[in-house]
Image (cartoon, grey):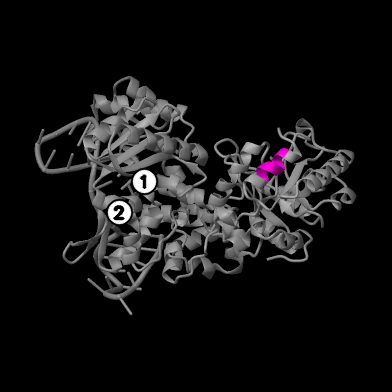
Amino acid sequence: MENKDVAAIFAEIADILEIQEGNPFRIRSFRRAAQIIENLSFSVSGAIQEDPEKLRSISGIGKGTLQKIKELVETGRCQEHEKLKQQVPPSLLPMLELQNLGPKKISLFWRELNVSSLEELEEAAGQQKLRTLPGMGEKSEAKILKAIEDYRRMQGRFQLDDGIEISESLIAYLESKISVHRIAAAGSVRRRRDTVGDIDILVTCEDPQKAISAFVQHPDASQVLASGDTKASIVLRRGLQADLRVLEDESFGAALQYFTGSKAHNVALRERAKRMGYKINEYGLFQTRDGEKVAGEEEEDIYRLLELPFIPPEIREGRGEIEQAEKRELPLLIEGKDIRGDLHMHTEATDGKDSIEEMATAGAKAGYDYIAITDHSKALAMAGGLDEEGLLRQIAKIDQASAENPKIEILKGIEVDILAEGELDLSDEVLSKLDVVVASVHSRFNLSAKEMTSRICHALENRYVNILGHPTGRLLTRREPYSVEMEEVIEKARENRVCLEINAHPSRLDLSDVHCRMASEMGVLLSINSDSHNTQMLRYMQYGIFTARRGWLSSNDVINTYPLERLRKVLKKEEYG
DNA sequence: GCCGTTTTCGGCCCGACTGTTTTCAGTCG
């Protein structure tokens, strides 16, 4: 059982308890446990078998949670969860996703009107039955119908690149409409999460009312969800929600801290503040004893007064960053300027658009010392994958291009398919002629976790494999990762001196941040690759760096920050870490 | 359910907006 499965069950327990109006603090504990488990850098099933104390020592995992994890790992079920599922129809739970509808109302509809599914809710609202209940009226009923419609239409989260682009355009729009003092995007966009659920913009300006009205009149706003004195929410045509908060200059830093989150980070920070005799909210840091405001204008001041170094937004996820910061043991996170090359890109030889020379020129322009050309292998017929002969011709072309391009080293590579049983799509003989071998799964995604794990591990045993490409195959917002026991794959990579890829394409970002941290803690090296299919895509590197930072990586964890000579040693497996 | 340099019991982050009220409950972030 993988961490995310265990986490999902705790989250569902919390949902059910919420509808039953159970103790809110108990509910919060289950949610917190779910979040901790999902973010863990080791697998709970391994820990249960080897060292349960490792779990128990985490703040937020107590006796009860540990017992339930143990039960889940050993039996695949948990009695309390099974019992709760009997008491509340599971069809009730998706209703929690509806905007402005929470457990209290859902429970009310269920008790009073026997509404137990989205469809029944829609029917009851259509028949104007909801408005007869206490606290309900005509408007609430209409809102629920709208929320059902939105739920069916909206796909939920958006890719980070879209989130960044939309927030930058909203900022430019506001700057063109009003006299802005300071403005910034907060939330998951600022934390550079792989997907974003909404956009948070903070602004200080001359005239707050004008900011709100300009915002709600944005030409791309399809809906205004709220519009108050200091806060407004709109839904953009693309389906993404955007929130604006208007602030005083003296609170900008506090608001930036507050709205950057994550929620888990803020809760932990507030607990610390409280222990130290302070109170934090979006307006500032205040002394508990006399209410005096001691910080607020700059975000840095808040961390400084709490006796912490500045914590980069990318790692503010409540994954132990505050404790590490307190000990001054946060890693020095990798930065864009550390990258010296790009080890995964395609050309017109297969499904890329540009030539070897054009990719090399683009690499040199990006300031790289080296690139690797890694086209597809023959199993990927759709992409015109290379067979042994084709690859030999490609090798000759790369040598030629390399001779003509003294500015940058062009490494000879391939992205070779991992076939059904874990064998590779090209012979060892031809692979041995290459500098870089990226091995990737592009087919048969539906294997069981066990089969997929052994398939990938088998491929990693090939002595020519250097990098496991996009290790879980996910496509953000479109395709779930295939099931695989990542801890086993990481262990196998370490044994065989293979690196794991962070595929920087914004729809992949795979390895995920959590798995990056797991890999680095287990002593495995990574490579951040753009997987470019044309020269424009080299810029995707930045998204891979965001993911690496979110995974607590420093430049030493990432082989394409190494000078060429050191990189070559790693690729020849003479050196590792 | 979790936690403890005030506590093994009694707390648990906090403020804005909306719709329903006529002082507040529910929801959200």
Marks 2 and 1 in Cβ contact (< 8 Å): no
Is A137 left, or right, of A352 in this rendering? Answer: left
Q: Which mark is in front, 2 or 1?
A: 2
Question: SS class of the residue under badge 1?
Answer: helix
Q: Is residue A510 above or below residue A564?
A: above
State the CA–CA distance, disc 2 to disc 1: 31 Å
Name the amino acid type tagged 1.
Answer: Glu
Q: Chain of mark 1?
A: A
Name the amino acid type tagged 2.
Answer: Ala
Residue A452 point in image, percent of width and height = 71, 48
Residue B22 point in image, percent of width and height = 9, 36
Residue A119 point in image, percent of width and height = 42, 26
Is A273 left, or right, of A402 in this rendering? Answer: left
* Same chain? Circles 2 and 1: yes
The residue tagged 1 is: A18
Crowding at mark 1 (Cα within 10 Å: few <14, some 14-19, many 20+): many
Q: Is residue A472 above or below residue A149?
A: below
Q: Quadrant of the C terminus of chain A?
A: bottom right
Q: Please, what is the dominant secondary structure of the magenta stretch?
A: helix
Residue A157 in sight in this render: no
Q: Nearer the viewer, residue A356 or A457?
A: A356
Q: Is residue A441 above or below residue A30?
A: above
Mark sitting on residue A254: 2
Q: Which residue in the rendered view is the most extreme toward the top?
A: A127
Measuring 47% from the left and 51% from the top, which residue is drawn there?
Answer: A10
Q: Which residues are magenta?
A: A358-363
Tell whether position A396 is magenta. no
Crowding at mark 2 (Cα within 10 Å: few <14, some 14-19, many 20+): many
